[in-house]
Image (spheres, grey):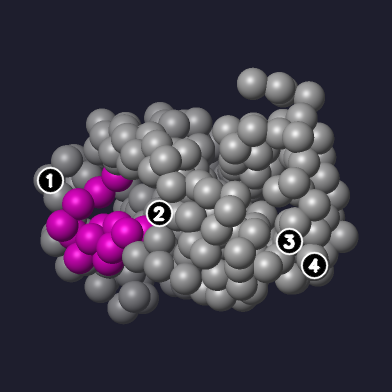
Amino acid sequence: MNWRAVGAIIRKDIKVVLRSKAVLLPIILVPLFIQVILPAALGLGVNLIPQSSSEMEDLAQMMSAMPPGLQEQLGSLDEKQLFLTLMLVYVFAPFFLIVPLMVSSVIAADSFAGEKERKTLEALLHSAITNQELLAGKLLAAWLPAIAVSLASFLLYGVIANAVGWPILGQIFFPTTMWFVLVLWVAPAVSGLGLGVTVLISSRVKTFQEAYQLGGIIVVPIVALVIGQAAGVLYLSSGFTFALGLIAWLIDAALLWLGIRTFQRERLLAQL
């Protein structure tokens, strides 16, 4: 493996991302909305709601539907503390996974389909690099920025969560062990899942928009996690989160194997 060639592909793709508004804007705006605006608005709203309001009473009924393990963890909190902790620590956790998934998918969609649109793919395919080096460069060019954006988003989210939670909880309550597992184990796997699917798609379609839209189907499992927690069917404990990441890593390995097996320069050249 010629890592200098791989590094050249990574640098080239990242430069293209930084110059493209269609790619760069979602990478900035989506994490900003999910990790800053939503938790800040929620926290400010909870601080303004009276303790004896009907909204707080409804929360007790909602909590009764939660799994026993979660009820035991949060049983000592009052209504406001319970609501804030439940939302910021548990309910918002699956939303965090949208960040690495979206970033990797956007960049990966641009990896082949975008180059087809810009008429730069033919020169790359004729260059003196192996298929493995080309795929490694394309995958890492999407995966590394996704990890960087995820870590930055996690830090921002932690600051916002503790800032809005301090008047209610009187302590720093975030992050929990589950969140460390989510950020350091699951998020890298999920970003790999997103880029693996999207690269396979983008090598077969002609435009960036087609690749990005088709790759968006991978967000369905995250929506299922949100619904599952809201319905009280499950909650993201540290063990469950670790198992979730393990499954994602196994799928990543399968996608990587499939990508290496099915990648054909001749087919890509025929599509140009």
Residue designated by label 1: 68
The quarter of the rendered structure image containing the C terminus is bottom right
Q: Residue at x 54, y 54 (%)?
A: 199
Q: What whole-number distance in Å separates the C-alpha atoms at marks 2 and 1?
A: 20 Å
Residue linked to disc 3: 115
Residue wearing tag 2: 94
Q: Are marks 4 and 3 in contact (CB under 8 Å)?
A: yes
- Magenta-span inclusion, residue 113: no
Q: CA distance from mark 2 to mark 3?
A: 32 Å
Between marks 1 and 4, how big is the CA–CA gap? 55 Å
Query: Foreground mark, 2 or 1?
Result: 2
- Residue 139 position within the rendered picture, expressed as x and y whole percent measured from the top left: 60, 42
Looking at the image, residue 189 sits to the left or right of residue 22; the answer is left
Q: Residue furthest bottom?
A: 54
Pick the front one: 203 or 245: 203
Say what amino acid the circle numbered 3 marks. Answer: Glu
Does residue 20 appear in this view?
yes
Disc 3/disc 1 C-alpha distance (Å): 51 Å
